[in-house]
Amino acid sequence: MIRVTILLGFFVFLYKLVYTNEIILYVHPRFTSFIEIACVLFFLMLLRQCWKFKKTRELRDSHSCFHDRILNYLPFILTLLVAFLLPNADLNANMVNNRGLNSNLTNKSSSEDYRNELQQATFVKITDSNFLGVLRELTYHPEENSGKRIELKGFAYKSNDELPGSTSLVRYVVGCCAADAYPYGIICETADSAILTEGAWYEVQGTLQTRQVNGRNVPVVQVTWVAAIDRPACPYIFPN
């Protein structure tokens, strides 16, 4: 009966994640099919265990044997308790400092297409599909895009690592799962720094400018318009 309960618990948990699409808080969408397969396998194992339990049910074991079996399955039971009791939450501003803002951003040749596109553009709109490529291009060639209008969305993160008292608009980029997520963002300057509350989501428009930070040029958005928005249903960026 313990095995039946454990298998049922894992099946219900995985099914809930897939059905509510909360699975994207943990893994890249290209891996969700594997989770769906695992869900089916747990269901089949559950049916087999139910049939086996019905066919082989014997007299109730002694009290000591029951405790021994509980101890054997304790890791699985604790895992299920944690899974059901802890809320599903996305990575937020509180974790940016631990992972390092833009710490894993590299100048890859794949941004060449974005460079050609940005050279011809006077207005830059950052979306989920072009976020990483455009941000990489803006970071490594800030002077070429200075003066252009820009629009982007993200959550506010306040840090003194770059410009003192600056606020960046940030998104997490997930390559495989939440464990390898890195925060990427761009500094946003406003007339009043209190306008942007850390952790809240915003959509901003402004003008790209360049600032000297620690001996290097970095892109900065001089904000001209800002609006608070709800957290997107999919808060992460998933590169192809």
Image (tube, helix red, strand yellow):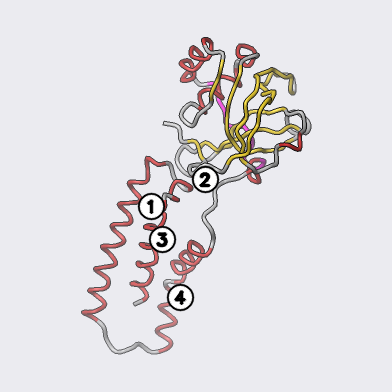
Residue at the spot of label 1: 18
Q: Quadrant of the N terminus?
A: bottom left
How far is the residue under mark 2 from the one under mark 4? 30 Å
**Which residue is more in the foreground, 87 or 27?**
87
Tell me residue 52's x, y (percent). Answer: 23, 74
Write down the quadrant of residue 217 in the picture.
top right
SS assignment at label 3 = helix
- Badge 3 or badge 1: first in the primary sequence: 3
SS assignment at label 4 = helix
Q: Residue at x 65, y 32 (%)?
A: 226
In contact (CB < 8 Å): disc 3 and disc 4: no
**Amino acid type, residue under disc 4 in the picture:** Leu
- Badge 4 or badge 1: first in the primary sequence: 1
Q: Nearer the viewer, mark 4 or mark 1?
A: 1
**Amino acid type, residue under disc 3 in the picture:** Phe
Q: Nearer the viewer, mark 2 or mark 4?
A: 2
Q: Check residue 13 in the rendering and tell me which mark sits there, or answer none.
A: 3
**Amino acid type, residue under disc 1 in the picture:** Val
- Badge 2 or badge 4: first in the primary sequence: 4
In contact (CB < 8 Å): disc 2 and disc 4: no
The magenta stretch spans residue 102: yes
- Badge 2 or badge 3: first in the primary sequence: 3
Residue at the spot of label 2: 179
In contact (CB < 8 Å): disc 2 and disc 3: no
Residue at the spot of label 4: 71
How far is the residue under mark 3 from the one under mark 4? 22 Å
Tell me residue 200's x, y (percent). Answer: 64, 42
Location of residue 35 with respect to 225 vertically, above or below:
below
Residue bounds of the magenta highlight? 97-107
Question: Could you classify mark 1 by the number of other residues whose Cα lies within 10 Å: few (under 14), some (14-19), or many (20 or more)?
Answer: some
Q: Residue at x 29, y 89 (%)?
A: 59
How far is the residue under mark 4 from the one under mark 1? 30 Å
